[in-house]
Image (cartoon, helix red, strand yellow):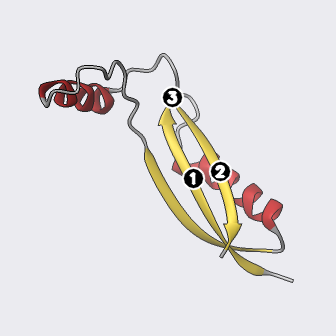
């Protein structure tokens, strides 16, 4: 039986890929006096509500969405988290 699942997708740049937004944040934090911040990786959070037969089906659907549209797998890494909606 289908139900709605809340799915969070966190997308971040892969290690070794330049992250201009993260570097800008790091510099701004330094300017605000937070000198101990050595690295910042900026990303984005996408929240989906997915109808599926179970959490694994919701995860599989979200992963397919990531591969086709949400993330660029060449330069980005994504993590999918499913919870009951």
Q: Which dot, 3 or 2, sits closer to the camera?
A: 2
Q: Nearer the viewer, residue 43 or 83?
A: 83
Mark 2 — residue? 80
Query: What distance separates the C-alpha of mark 3 from that of mark 2?
Result: 17 Å
Q: In percent of the image, x 12 and y 26: which residue is there?
A: 31
Give the residue number, with chain letter if any, for mark 1: 9
> Is disc 1 in contact with disc 2, using a CB cutoff of under 8 Å?
yes
User: Which is closer to the viewer, label 3 or label 1?
Assistant: 1
Please state the horizontal and vertical placement of residue 37, each as a whole percent of the image: 32, 23
Q: Residue at x 87, y 83 (%)?
A: 1
Give x and y (percent) for residue 38: 34, 18
Does residue 37 appear to the left or right of 85 in the view shown?
left
SS of the residue at dot 2? Answer: strand
Q: Residue at position x 83%, y 70% from top? A: 54
The relative height of residue 13 versus residue 84 in the rendered view (above or below) is above
User: Is residue 9 depicted above or below 1 in this figure?
Assistant: above
Residue at 69% from the left image edge and 61% from the top image edge: 82
Q: Is residue 63 left or right of residue 2?
A: left
Q: Which mark is residue 75?
A: 3
């Amino acid at each position: 039986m289908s139900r709605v699942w809340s799915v969070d997708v966190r997308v971040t740049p892969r290690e070794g890929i330049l992250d201009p937004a993260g570097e800008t944040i790091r510099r701004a934090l330094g300017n605000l006096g937070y000198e101990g911040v050595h690295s910042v990786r900026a990303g984005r959070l996408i929240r989906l509500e997915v109808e599926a037969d179970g959490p694994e089906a919701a995860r599989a659907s979200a992963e397919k969405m990531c591969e086709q549209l949400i993330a660029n797998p060449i330069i980005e890494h994504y993590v999918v988290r499913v919870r009951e909606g």
